Amino acid sequence: MKKIQLACLFVLLLLISPKVLKSQISDVEITYQVNTDNSVDVNFKKQLVGTYLINIEFDQLSNCENYSSAKYTYSGTIRGRVGKVLTLKPKDPNMGIGFSFSYQYHRGKPFPKIKENFVYLLPFSKGTKVKVNHMNYLGKRFGKGAPDSWKAFQFITEKSEPVVAMRKGVVVEVKDQFVADTTKDFHYNDNVNEVLIEHRDGTLARYSCFKSGSICVKEGQTVHPNTKLGLTGWYSASKKRELHVFIYYLKIRMLEKLEDEENKQNAYAYIDPLFYHKGDKVNLLSGNLYVSDSNDELITQEFTRREKKKYSSSIQ
């Protein structure tokens, strides 16, 4: 999350010709354009892939029809690379709008509508045997309480196994620059290779602990169930290969609340989803062995008509 104060932007916009001013270079840039009717389009441009919550705090606001208060915080989501956030309209169309603003952004769509009983595939090729453990929240070691809904999975394999997508989504972040240090046992290590996927409903799935150099997807790529992402890797000195999986969503709308430590820990809600196993829909139990499986209905449950037609042709 970043907060960027746009300095010296309190102006009475009396210009007739359109003009665009923008902030310093950032992963997310908020710009504004004054139109000939003295309305103001507030736009965004972002380098980041995926959906982001953005809060724009107007510290001073005058001659604005939308909001009568001199202070106002807009909250909304932005997608894509460029677009319009909102339009300010003048009360008096013969005068410009006076304003200054700052903004913050954070990954995720707040409080997405999640389909109950949605079934995920295990994140491995069909027939792969894996052991599953529930992971503890390691922040407790530093005196921090666990998020209210904490849930994370550790999948253990005897050798490097292909990791596949559990459901359809868009790859929004890839990290593949770390080589595992197998000389030490780590309770916590954030130098791990990861793939983050955003699903259609706004949930996010973080796949963590890939073998160095094995990730085979790119940011912006759409993946389907069973699309290969990479290979399981080492986390520490253990000879076991691991994959860590977190499924979560953003559950705050006002980003200033993140300044509070408790709110930081609970900014996201974690999901304990149903997985497909032996023809049934189950919650994964810690310490149990599972065998990955799939069927056409689950693979195509979020496909478009074109994707279903293409998939049907591929299996005939």
Image (cartoon, rainbow, N blue to C red):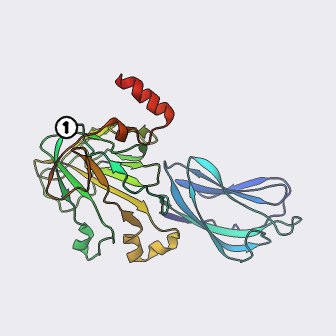
Q: Which is nearer the eye, 289 or 142?
A: 289
Instruction: Classify mark 1: residues with Cα within 10 Å, few (<14), some (14-19) or many (20+).
Output: few
Q: Which is nearer the eye, 101 or 146?
A: 146
Q: Is residue 101 above or below residue 277?
A: below
Name the residue at 46% across, 41% down: 220
Where in the figure is residue 248, as x and y percent of width and height? 38, 59
Where in the figure is residue 42, as x and y percent of width and height? 68, 58
Is residue 160 visible to the viewer in this orientation of the structure?
yes
Quarter of the C terminus within the rendering: top left
Is residue 10 visible to the viewer in this orientation of the structure?
no
Where in the figure is residue 271, as x and y percent of width and height? 34, 60
Residue type at numbered disc 1? Gly
Kindly identify which residue carries mark 1: 127
Mark 1: which secondary structure? loop
Q: How many marks?
A: 1
Q: Which is nearer the eye, 154 or 4?
A: 154
Could you tell whether 71 is left or right of 95 in the image?
left
Q: Is residue 16 above or below residue 223?
A: below
Name the residue at 42% across, 60% down: 249
Q: Is residue 123 above or below residue 144?
A: above
Q: Residue furthest top?
A: 316
Which quarter of the picture shows residue 76? Answer: bottom right
Q: Residue furthest front?
A: 279
Name the residue at 33% across, 70% down: 147
Could you tell whether 30 is left or right of 207 in the image?
right
Which quarter of the picture shows residue 294? Answer: top left
Q: Residue furthest right?
A: 94
Could you tell whether 70 is left or right of 150 in the image?
right
